[in-house]
Image (cartoon, rainbow, N blue to C red):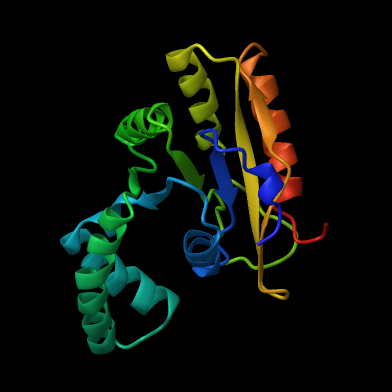
Amino acid sequence: MEGWENVNGSPAIFVGRHMDMYGPVTIMAWASIPRLRAWVLYKFMDKQTCYHHYATYTMMKRRGYPALWSKILARILSWLVPPLCRSLRAIPVYRGSKDIIRTMKQSVEALEQGDSILVMPEIDYVDRDDAVGELYAGFIQLGRLYCAKTRCKSIAFVPVYSDMQRSAVCIRQPVVFHADQPFQQERIRVMEQLKHGLSGAQ
């Protein structure tokens, strides 16, 4: 672990990279950030949708496994993954749906209660290059919504980098979102600084 000085105990939005499953596993297992709740695609929160996603997409399309093996592995994972996500108090993400409002509402409530949020916004979630690719930007809305709900002036977005070569989890310099600045301006600034903080070349 590196960068403990960048965690002050206040609710924050931690931002990491997927790097397939390496990022979320290392951060949730080793970062020991107090009261951390991860955003997880809603399909992994329910046994049926989890099975369908693993069987038809992850195993067959991504991994290229035969249909029978895909179904067997998907069945096993559908028994394990949803209970694990629920035990970690994961927040379901309804990407591309109007139900994303539910994700935002639950996340703001969690921040109000003193929890922190972990977001993995990479579009290409298997990318392991040092340079950061494209990121979904919608999660920046959390800053505006939280500040509006609590009438605070700012909240920190904290980049967390999982360094595979050094077997280290690096909590980097927080990027502070300022609610009293024009939102579009802040969104661009915060995204640019987060991309730098998530880069392997530091």
Looking at the image, which residue is at 67% across and 50% down?
4
Q: Could you tell me residue 8's position as x and y percent?
A: 61, 38
Identified at 69% across, 38% down, the residue is 174
Percent of width and height locating residue 126: 55, 67
Query: Viewer-proximal residue, 69 or 146?
Result: 146
Compared to 174, does 42 lie above or below?
below
> Vertically, is 165 above or below 111?
below
Q: Above or below — where is 78 with respect to 116?
A: below
Q: Indicate the position of residue 171 as horizontal and vertical percent values.
A: 67, 52
Q: Observer-nearest residue: 17 or 149?
A: 149
166 or 120: nearer the viewer: 166
In the rendered view of the protein, which quadrant contains the N terminus?
Answer: bottom right
Q: Is residue 73 visible?
A: yes
Q: In the drawing, does residue 166 fall left or right of residue 7?
A: right
Kindly tell me whether residue 136 is visible in this rendering: no
User: Considering depth in this image, is 164 or 53 the residue closer to the camera?
Assistant: 164
Identified at 24% across, 61% down, the residue is 82
Residue at the spot 63% in from the left edge and 52% down from the top edge: 160
Q: Residue furthest right?
A: 202
Horizontally, residue 10 falls left or right of residue 94, namely right
The number of numbered badges drawn on the structure is 0
Residue 47 as seen in the image, left or right of residue 184: left
For residue 66, side relative to residue 48 (left or right): right
In this rendering, is residue 186 above or below 175? above
Q: Position of residue 81 (x, y in %)?
A: 28, 66
Instruction: Assign the C terminus to one quadrant of the image.
Output: bottom right
To which quarter of the image does residue 45 belong?
bottom left
